[in-house]
Amino acid sequence: MSSSTSRRVVSTTHQQAPATRPNGKAKHPGLTLLIIAGAQLMIVLDGTIVNIALPKMGEYFGKNQTDMTWAINSYTLAFGGLLLLGGRAGDILGRRRMFMVGLGLFALGSLLGGLAPNFELLIFGRVIQGIGGAIASPTALSLIATEFEEGPERTRAFAVFAAVAGAGAALGLLLGGVLTEYLTWRWVLFVNVPIGAVLVVGAYVYVHESDRLSGRFDWLGGALSTIGMTALVYGFINAASKGWSEPTTVGAFVVALVLLLGFVALQAKRSYAMMPLRIFRDKSRSGAYIVMLIIGAAMFGMFFFVTYFVQLVLGYSSLKAGLAFLPVAFTIGTAAQISAQLLARIGPRNLIIFGSVVMAGGLFWLSSISAESSYLGHLLPSLLVMSAGIGTIFVPLTSVAVAGVEPHEAGLASALLNVGQQVGGSIGLSVLTTVFATASRSEGKNQGERLGALVQSGQEQPTVLQHFMELSQQASGSVRASAGALQDAVANQAFHTVLAHGSSRGFLAAAIFAVVAVVVAATMISTGKDEIADVPLTPVP
């Protein structure tokens, strides 16, 4: 999800694009903007369109809820880990060229994922999508600066770009529900293929090539950070199923520690580092990045757990699940607009603290869900509270991140927010699913013992325990439950209790993260309203 309000959007690369180009601006500005905005829409859509299809994907591949986090994390790790390199590639190799390469890779990954006969190929396709998105997204934003004249024309183009970023998430929820419900889950990926092909051709015909800038690529830094974060996420997910002391879990954490420490050391030494550590010297800016990490964890966790809850516990169809999320997207966008209007009057620090408190309150409310919770009576109001908090934070967080930076590093400062959202989402989701899996196992044991006692006392038929086990095994992806199990009300109630308990513990962990965000905002962020009067704001895709 993204904040959709901006005064002026900056490039997400290390160096600013030239204000003018020898070959002029766009000859067909309407078509050029349609191509650039269309690419951004396709990338933003992916953040939500796949979420709605996750239960159907898991059913097809025989994967449990924890395993299916890889369908999200494989994309976000590649996207977040390589985003800075993608922007750099546009600067050095040409923005139109890399824009087309990114779109081509995104469409190719979508095709591979849609055709996937097994889970491994699905994940491979999602990684290719993430790489393509990491190249196309920052170059799309930079192309606006090079294709449109500074002034009203460029301002209108940025406004359209920001609006697309904001509306894309809501459209993805609805489109994901429609495609999964009336076609198949594969179409949430196939839909990108023809769109991507048309955009590549359109970019070749209507978008100018930019001037190339000199520079070097920090390939080693990109590899260390991406592989290190992947190892960290793998460690948490493996711990959820096999335990914290299992050798593979320990090994993953050790590899992650070594690689990430190596990445930090490398960034401290290299003059062409993709993430120069000097950007973190400002205490307020560092605080903004930490808060964004937490927002990413909260948002990814919310979409993931609620998607499964409404479909598996409330029994919603894919389409109804997509519709259930629309108020969330609308609330985030509305809150961001209001926050932007209040920024100069209240100041970013107060808005970030307020938004973090509201977000935490919504998550604590969500943590009280149970198998008896209804959508209108419990789920929706708590989601709206959380969403209002998140929306309030986006714009002031961006203003803090870019306040006081040198002009040539404004793009890097704002791009790191996007990186933080993706990385925080990946790592946070892996932590939350570990909490979910642990709590679900514990509650599953309790429900099994309760049903066993009911059978022994003659209050329930002996088959109820077997049906409960079938439903639990189906959720783990190992077997399909029998028709009798699916129709057993008592067994289903026990199974729903397990899922609801696991989800509630996951939301509780997210709420604790949000409390940390409140503390960080209060103690680290001190940027005043007088410091952000001329700060450019950028949407965070």
Image (cartoon, rainbow, N blue to C red):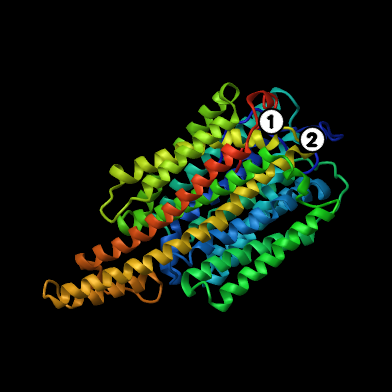
Question: What x and y, as percent, mark residue 259?
Answer: 71, 65
Question: Which residue is label 2 attached to?
Answer: 406
Residue 240 visible (yes or no): yes
Does residue 336 appear left or right of residue 382 in this picture?
right
Q: Nearer the viewer, residue 252 or 68?
A: 252
Q: Residue at x 84, y 35 (%)?
A: 23
Residue 483 visible (yes or no): no
Q: Quadrant of residue 206?
A: top right
For numbered disc 1, what is the local secondary structure?
loop
For numbered disc 2, what is the local secondary structure?
loop
Residue farthest to the front, as pictured: 523
Q: Which mark is residue 26?
A: none
Figure check: 272 above or below 488: above
Disc number lying in front (1 or 2): 2
- Residue type for callout 2: Glu
Q: Residue at x 61, y 46 (%)?
A: 290
Question: What x and y, as percent, mark residue 351?
Answer: 54, 31
Figure check: 346 above or below 462: above
- Residue type for callout 1: Pro
Residue farthest to the left, as pictured: 458
Question: Which residue is label 1 attached to?
Answer: 536
How packed mark 1 is, by other alpha carbons closer than 10 Å (few <14, some 14-19, many 20 or more), is some
Question: What x and y, as percent, mark residue 14?
Answer: 78, 43
Q: Quadrant of the C terminus?
A: top right
Does residue 205 appear left or right of residue 327 in this picture?
right
Q: Nearer the viewer, residue 291 or 149?
A: 291
